[in-house]
Image (tube, rainbow, N blue to C red):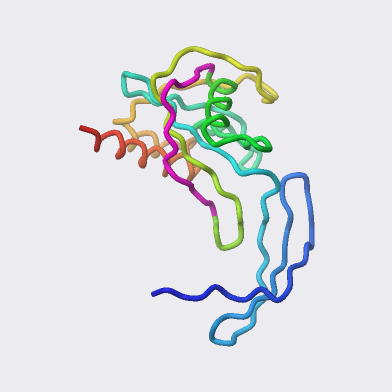
């Protein structure tokens, strides 16, 4: 069933940080109902999440500090896109900074959202293959641990207490299925 999007009568910024803006929307739905919604509007140019897959079928995960959960999380490398940066270039830069590899073959696989009911942020998934060692300096406050993980053991990975980031989990299953569907 296709629906018309609600009409936006007014937008107000109610809070702002260096990462997000909280925006209040006064909406009118096609049935005449009025509602006020708040959403987090990303500041910046979006983000990339990268699945760097080695020739042996292992994906290179990273373990890094996650402020939201105040613990170290195991997941895919990811990061914000710089102003004017293309998705593929951002993905290759991020894996050079975070895992010390670059990819000769990078494929954009689509976009993921988290909590689209109140958050505008999109993360672009990129598959990186034909990897070679290439390190670039990043902006991380400490060294990131790189953990190779067999794509065939995803069920074991998602049972771990330190692997809970939904974008990484969804992306890993998408990549595994994409690679399995190749002739």
Residue 34 as seen in the image, left or right of residue 51: right
Q: On screen, 26 above or below 131?
A: below
Front residue (pair 38, 26): 26
Q: State which region is magenta.
A: 100-114
**Quarter of the figure with residue 106:** top left
Classified by dominant secondary structure, the portion drawn in magenta counts as strand
Could you tell me residue 48's position as x and y percent? Answer: 54, 37
Front residue (pair 118, 178): 178
Q: Which residue is found at the position 52% from the left and 51% from the top?
A: 113
Could you tell me residue 30's position as x and y percent? Answer: 54, 82
Where, quadrant-wise, is the N terminus in this rendering?
bottom left
Could you tell me residue 168's position as x and y percent? Answer: 47, 39
Residue 119 as seen in the image, left or right of residue 43: left
Q: Residue furthest toward the top?
A: 133
Residue 76 as seen in the image, left or right of residue 29: left
Front residue (pair 107, 162): 107
Q: Which residue is found at the position 61% from the left and 17% from the top?
A: 136
């Amino acid at each position: 069933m296709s629906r018309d999007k609600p009409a936006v009568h007014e937008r107000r910024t109610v809070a702002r940080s260096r990462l997000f803006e909280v925006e209040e929307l006064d909406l009118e739905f096609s049935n005449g109902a009025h509602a006020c919604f708040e959403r987090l509007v990303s500041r910046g140019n979006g983000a990339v999440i990268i699945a760097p897959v080695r020739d042996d079928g292992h994906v290179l995960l990273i373990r890094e500090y996650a402020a939201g959960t105040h613990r170290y999380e195991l997941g895919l490398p990811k990061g914000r896109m710089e102003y004017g940066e293309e998705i593929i270039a951002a993905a290759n830069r991020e894996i050079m900074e975070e895992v010390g590899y670059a990819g000769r073959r990078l494929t954009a696989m689509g976009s993921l959202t988290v909590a689209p009911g109140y958050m505008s942020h999109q993360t672009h998934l990129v598959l990186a293959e034909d990897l070679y060692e290439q390190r670039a300096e990043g902006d991380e406050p400490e060294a990131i641990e790189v953990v190779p993980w067999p794509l065939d053991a995803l069920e074991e990975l998602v049972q771990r207490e330190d692997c809970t980031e939904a974008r990484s989990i969804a992306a890993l299953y998408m990549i595994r299925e994409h690679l399995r569907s190749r002739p």
